[in-house]
Image (cartoon, grey):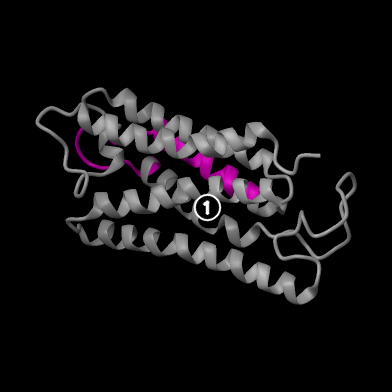
Amino acid sequence: MRVVPPWALLSAGAAPVFLVGGWLLGAARQPGGFDQVSGTISALAAVGAADRWIMTLGLVGFGLCHCVTAAGLRPLAVGGRALLALGGVATLAVAAFPLPADGGSAPHALAAAVAFGALAVWPAFAPAGTGGPRAGRPRGDALRPGGGHPAHHTHGRAAWAALAVGLLVPVAWFAIELATGGERIGLAERVAAGAEALCPALVAGWLSRR
């Protein structure tokens, strides 16, 4: 029995490809160049941006991949998988409500906030409970990130919480740059989004080796 199906591994690995490929290709298509340190990802998909479909496609692919991955990470708790899927759906909303040519967009900002938040905290809700083995699953510790022993389970939960904190730190940096109009807002966003893109792939790969 495969703990993580191959299609979930594929979607988890494709998510960062869609996101990073989108912002690299999208930036390369902007007339006169594009400063990825100060320019946001959303600017590449904004109304009026050159070849905005590239970044839009990247966001759509990224969001769909997270939804598919969430469905495939069966050993994890429903709460964590639901938050991962929510982050994917919110990313689809980011693509559906692009920034206008001038000014901001409340739906876009709300969707982006939900996406960044959900994709940062989902690991904290990912560990399975301490109850007995679920129906249809083999016994043993392979499906439990924290192991079967109570002490191991506590340590496992701490590791998942630390992973969430590690994702929240760059998200907080991005939020500060956004609130203060910092000159590195684009860099902060890419660090935060890149970490959130890689996390499900690392988790899926780890689970597949258990």
The residue located at (60%, 62%) in the rendering is 124
Residue at the image position 53 percent from the left and 63 percent from the top: 163
> Quadrant of residue 130 in the image?
bottom right
Q: Which of 112 and 20 is in front in this view?
A: 20
Q: What stretch is highlighted in magenta?
A: 81-107
- Whether residue 100 is visible here, answered yes or no, is no
> Can you give x and y, in whole percent of width and height, for residue 84 in the image?
58, 47
Location of the N terminus by quadrant is: top right
Q: Which residue is drawn at 85% across and 63% down?
A: 131
In this view, the residue farthest toward the bottom is 151
Residue 19 located left or right of residue 65: left
Say above or below: 86 vs 167: above
The residue at the point 33 percent across, 48 percent down is 190
- Spot occupied by residue 71 in the image (x, y as percentages of width and height): 67, 39
Q: Nearer the viewer, residue 14 or 122?
A: 14
64 in the magenta segment: no
Q: Is residue 124 visible?
A: yes
Judged left or right of residue 169, residue 165 is right
State left or right for residue 125 relative to residue 25.
Answer: right
Residue 20 place in picture, x, y as percent: 36, 38
Answer with left or right where residue 59 lies relative to residue 163: left
Circle 1 sits on which residue? Answer: 118
State which quadrant residue 56 falls in.
Answer: top left
The kind of residue tagged 1 is Ala
